[in-house]
Amino acid sequence: MVFHVYEDAKSACEAGAVLMAAEILKRDDCVLGLATGSTPIPTYEKLVSMYQAGILDFSNVRSFNLDEYVGIDYANPVSYHAFMNENLFSKVNMKQENIHLPDGCTDEDGARYDKAIREAGGVDIQLLGIGRNGHIGFNEPCDCFPIGTHVVTLTESTIQANARFFSSADEVPRKAISMGIGNIMSARAVLLIATGADKADAVYRTICGPVTPQVPASVLQLHPCCTILLDKAAASKLG
Ligand code: GLP
């Protein structure tokens, strides 16, 4: 695990775009694992600007997103389908058939998603944000590391954190479908970006704490190729 600390959030996020761009340049049909949340927005903006400048071509790039709420209308702007469309897919030349997000509400739907990832040859680089409680994707703190894509019940802390995207906390779906820790650990490279003081504790526990499913991101200590990009605020507890 390596980590880099940047002066500000924009630089950390743009460094993330550089790593993802390198993957696309190495293999034009690479498989990107994508994340939502406010953190990676500048990363997507940078990727879009590199596409617009003619530096990147997404025509053969394939993607698998980490997660989606269960039961949400995908036309709803707060759905992760809509988020990805708004921030990346509608702005680059990816082919619709190469874009995948988890869909459905059962573990069988999750197993189908895992099969599609395997058939694509696995994820080359998995982008991650992090929840304040150390969750990655929607893998919430629990007693074990979930392996494959599965249905999860969101914790109260995540519901409260994500309420800012909805008109109230009551509107936040209580369930989501998420890649498991096994999926994330199977990616050939992992890139976690964390910015802002409210992530400092989760970042500290991810990098310096014991590996435990109570802090799902701590498992990344065991990944052979994990890069963590931080701004100063998120790194403030690292000493
Ligand atoms: C959600 C997503 C995560 C994301 C997290 C942090 O819960 N499922 O993938 O990392 O939020 O989001 P933000 O970047 O907005 O803080």
Image (cartoon, rainbow, N blue to C red):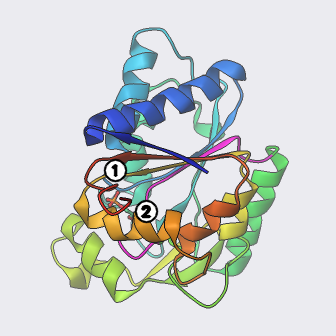
Above or below for 138 versus 81? below
Majority secondary structure of magenta residues: loop
Does the magenta portion include 126?
yes
Which residue, given by chain and number where applicable, does mark 2 sit on?
130
The residue under the point 46% across, 36% down is: 16
Question: Where in the figure is residue 66, as x and y percent of width and height?
Answer: 56, 59
Q: Which one is earlier in the sequence, the residue at label 2 or at label 1?
A: 1
Q: Which residues are magenta?
A: 122-134
Residue 55 drawn at (x, y percent): 50, 11
Q: Which image quadrant shows ligand 1? A: bottom left
Q: Residue at x 59, y 71 (%)?
A: 104
Q: Badge 1 is on which residue?
A: 39
Instruction: Classify residue 20 by image quadrant.
Output: top right
Distance of mark 2 from mark 1, alpha carbons? 9 Å
Residue 130 sits above or below residue 92 on the image: below
Residue extending farthest top: 54
Magenta segment includes 109: no
| Visible residue check, residue 136 | no
Q: Amino acid at mark 1?
A: Thr
